[in-house]
Amino acid sequence: MNISLAAETLFHIGTFPVTNTLMVAWVLAAVFIVFAILVGTRLREVPKGLQNAAEAAIEALLRLVEGVTQNRAQAIKFFPLVATIFLFVLFSNLVEVMPGLGTVGLQEVHEGKSIIVPFLRSASADLNFTLALALSAVIGVQVMGVAAIGAAKYAGKFLVPPWKQPYGIGTFVGLLELIGEVAKIVSFSFRLFGNIFAGEVLLTVVLVLVPYLVPLPFLFLELFVGFIQALVFSMLTIVFLKMATEEHESGMEHVTRNMKHVP
């Protein structure tokens, strides 16, 4: 048994290392692209087969987005980013319960010991993947926020002149807002990475110690965790998109306005 925090390299393309997590991500992306092409080129007025499955998934995800935004037009605008994140994270997480996890791979000698470098490893168990996904989500939020309310108004949430009443406090609050945007990247990436990596370690240890029957409850648990993590990542993205694309007064403006009504 070999547990590695970093993704294991399978081979190199020139000097570029191709890891098992990167390979899984490439395969998933290829499957989604092929599926989209097959469905897109065979659209029928009365759906059947793959089109039925695609329309059911799209409708369910669209209802999920609309349930948060309470706005059909906004839901349609957010849908491509949110649906892509949800499906990619979900299927990446489900890789960790596939047969062969940690047991089928390349045999190598590391520090005098024979180890197996597995072919299968969830892309979500690689911090590089979760960080890239978090950056994509947060940058997407900023771009949609600027597009919805304009660059000047959007920047006004973070860059508040110190001479604006209440003096200096607005600048401090704007700085906290800016730090909060950066913190989203850390929160997004480490939450997903930590949960999936811990699940992989748990499954690997249980499979090695007690390979029969005992791992079954843990497999079902990881199926549930994988779905929940994909849902949480998507729901938080929707909430941040909703907040970024609506004009609203800052917390300090809200407090200042309400204090005027205090006798």
Image: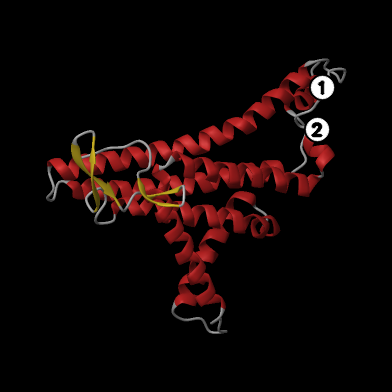
Q: In which quarter of the image is the N terminus?
A: top left
Of badges 1 and 2, nearer the viewer stands: 2
**SS assignment at label 2:** loop
Q: In the rendered image, which quarter contains the C terminus?
A: top right
Residue 184, picture quadrant: top right
Disc assigned to residue 261: 1
Residue in the picture at 24% in, 55% down: 100
**How many numbered marks appear?**
2
Can you identify the residue that label 2 sits on? 156
* Residue type for callout 1: His
Q: Pick the residue in front: 263 or 186.
A: 186
Q: Residues within 10 Å of mark 1 (few under 14, many from 20)?
A: few
Residue 245 seen in this snapshot: no
Q: Position of residue 210 (x, y in %)?
A: 12, 43
Residue shown at 52% from the left, 40% from the top: 131
In the picture, residue 72 is in which quadrant? Answer: bottom right
Q: Which of 207 and 77 is in front in this view?
A: 207
Q: Which amino acid does label 2 sit on?
A: Gly
Q: Position of residue 230 (x, y in %)?
A: 46, 49
Label 1, label 2: how far apart the Cα atoms are: 26 Å
Image-based side of 170 in relation to 112, left or right: right
Residue furthest to the right in view is: 163
